Image (cartoon, rainbow, N blue to C red):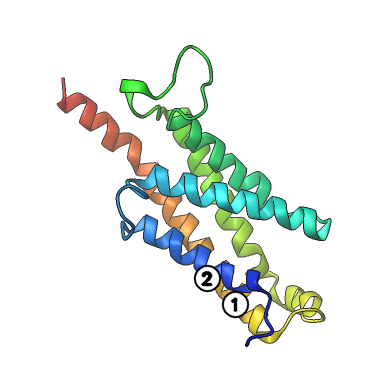
């Protein structure tokens, strides 16, 4: 039996589920498009960051950065009504240039948030190494790397969606 806390194994599980959604490896009822994947991953990540704040009594910027992605993608999906009867209904996606920009900036900020521990690894390892195992530190480093890449890919793909949606709208007329 491993002496590692159960949450240690949540890092690779969360990363794996996020990539599975990104590359369409989950059933379509779970992950049908980029927005669904971003919404699910950001919502889970923001909740995890909130739990970390509660548990450690220190700031986790994931609440802000992932919260930004979660809220903006929820607005796009029509899960949050921003007034004027903009519920999802038959109108479909609410993607506008401004919302796309907010989502993309949010993804970039999440990516940077995951990259920060890697950039400052010597300090992170020195500080956390006093209370964490080498297995946990290695897992955390890999987790930060793959999730920084995941959110950078999301930002890139999200940035291209507005042209695709505009072309589809023009073709349907």
Percent x, y of residue 48: 64, 55
Residue at the spot 82% in from the left edge and 56% down from the top edge: 58
Residue at the spot 28% in from the left edge and 33% down from the top edge: 165
Contact (Cβ within 8 Å) of mark 2 with mark 1: yes
Residue at the spot 72% in from the left edge and 84% down from the top edge: 133
User: Label 1, on which residue?
Assistant: 139
Closer to the camera, 70 or 163? 70
The reply to whether residue 55 is visible in this rendering is yes
Percent x, y of residue 64: 67, 44
Closer to the camera, 122 or 37? 37
Give the vertical position of 28 relative to 87 (above or below): below
Question: Which sits earlier in the primary sequence, circle 2 or circle 1?
Answer: 2
Left or right of residue 156: residue 134: right
Give the vertical position of 108 relative to 90 (above or below): below
Q: Residues within 10 Å of mark 2 (few under 14, many from 20)?
A: some
Tell me how far mark 2 sits from mark 1, CA to CA: 8 Å
Percent x, y of residue 152: 47, 56
Toward the front, the furthest residue is 1
Left or right of residue 76: residue 109: right
The reply to whether residue 59 is visible in this rendering is no
Name the secondary structure under disc 1. Answer: helix
Give the vertical position of 18 relative to 92 (above or below): below
Q: Residues within 10 Å of mark 1 (few under 14, many from 20)?
A: some
Name the secondary structure under disc 2. Answer: helix
Percent x, y of residue 44: 56, 51
User: Label 2, on which residue?
Assistant: 12
């Amino acid at each position: 039996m491993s002496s590692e806390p159960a949450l240690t194994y949540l890092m690779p599980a969360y990363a794996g589920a996020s990539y599975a959604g990104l590359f369409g490896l989950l059933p379509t009822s779970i992950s049908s498009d980029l927005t669904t994947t971003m919404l699910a991953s950001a919502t889970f990540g923001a909740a995890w960051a909130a739990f970390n704040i509660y548990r450690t009594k220190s700031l986790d910027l994931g609440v802000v950065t992932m919260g930004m992605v979660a809220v903006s993608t929820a607005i796009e999906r029509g899960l949050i009504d921003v007034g004027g009867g903009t519920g999802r209904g038959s109108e479909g996606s609410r993607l506008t240039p401004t919302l796309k920009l907010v989502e993309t900036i949010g993804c970039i900020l999440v990516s940077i948030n995951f990259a920060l521990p890697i950039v400052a690894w010597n300090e992170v390892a020195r500080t956390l190494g006093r209370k964490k195992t080498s297995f946990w530190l290695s897992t955390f480093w890999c987790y930060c790397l793959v999730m920084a890449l995941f959110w950078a890919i999301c930002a890139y793909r999200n940035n291209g969606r507005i042209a695709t949606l505009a072309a589809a709208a023009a073709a349907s007329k």
